[in-house]
Image (tube, rainbow, N blue to C red):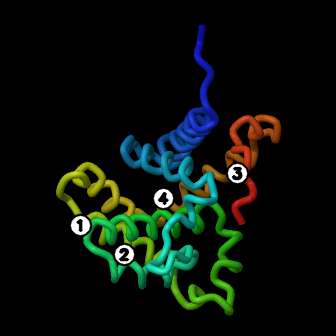
Amino acid sequence: MIPLMTGEEALRRLFAALTEQTFQVELGVADPPLMDYLTDLLVRFARSEALNGYRDAEGRRLTQVVDMLQEAEHRQAKPRRELHRHIGDYTLFWTGVFPEALPRLQAPDRKDHLISYEQHGRTSYLIASRFEEQPFEDEAPILRRLSEEYDLCREGLNRVRQEWDRLPTEELARYSNDDDSLGEAA
């Protein structure tokens, strides 16, 4: 008897297949650790609470990159590293997967209006990659690669999104969470 997959396992398999097809076949990037990282990012951010999971000292959710950057400067080394990694992931997710949300996220009435998500994503990945001791030594090269190849990864994630948009609604419904759905991030 074949065990049933959980929703997250099925979602991981879907994203892994789409990511592998996009990066290896379409873009010619054969880098399994990078593809695994991007698959994990997509699975993690499929649930909206992961997007805004960080809080400031007063307990308020950090929903703007400017606030995340400011908070990162006040944190100790390891939490600072994690927040910079999150900033890289957050900006890559929005610029790659849901770029149509950027006008709202960077509207004139928001702190993020005058910043570049791409530049801060690259820089944040680079800062996070400089933590090379245990337990971060395996992830450091991937974060450095994300910093160096941010535009390629953004384009690849945009193509992954285009592919999942082509999937029939019934098929996507099998992968969506009870309280979130893949097409409603913005």
Disc 1 to disc 2, how far (Cα)? Answer: 11 Å
Disc 3 to disc 1, how far (Cα)? Answer: 32 Å
Q: Position of residue 66 (x, y in %)?
A: 49, 84
Q: Position of residue 101 (x, y in %)?
A: 69, 71
Q: Earlier in the sequence, mark 4 or mark 2?
A: 2
- CB contact under 8 Å: marks 1 and 2: no
Q: Residues within 10 Å of mark 1 (few under 14, many from 20)?
A: some
**Which residue is label 3 attached to?**
182
Residue at 74%, 54% (x, y): give it.
183
Residue at 75%, 58% (x, y): give it.
184
**Which residue is label 1 attached to?**
130
* Residue 126 visible, this angle: no
The secondary structure type at the circle numbered 1 is loop
The secondary structure type at the circle numbered 3 is loop
Disc 4 to disc 2, how far (Cα)? Answer: 15 Å
**Which residue is label 4 attached to?**
153
Q: Amino acid at mark 1?
A: Arg
Taking the image as shown, residue 143 lies to the left or right of residue 56, namely left
The furthest residue to the front: 58
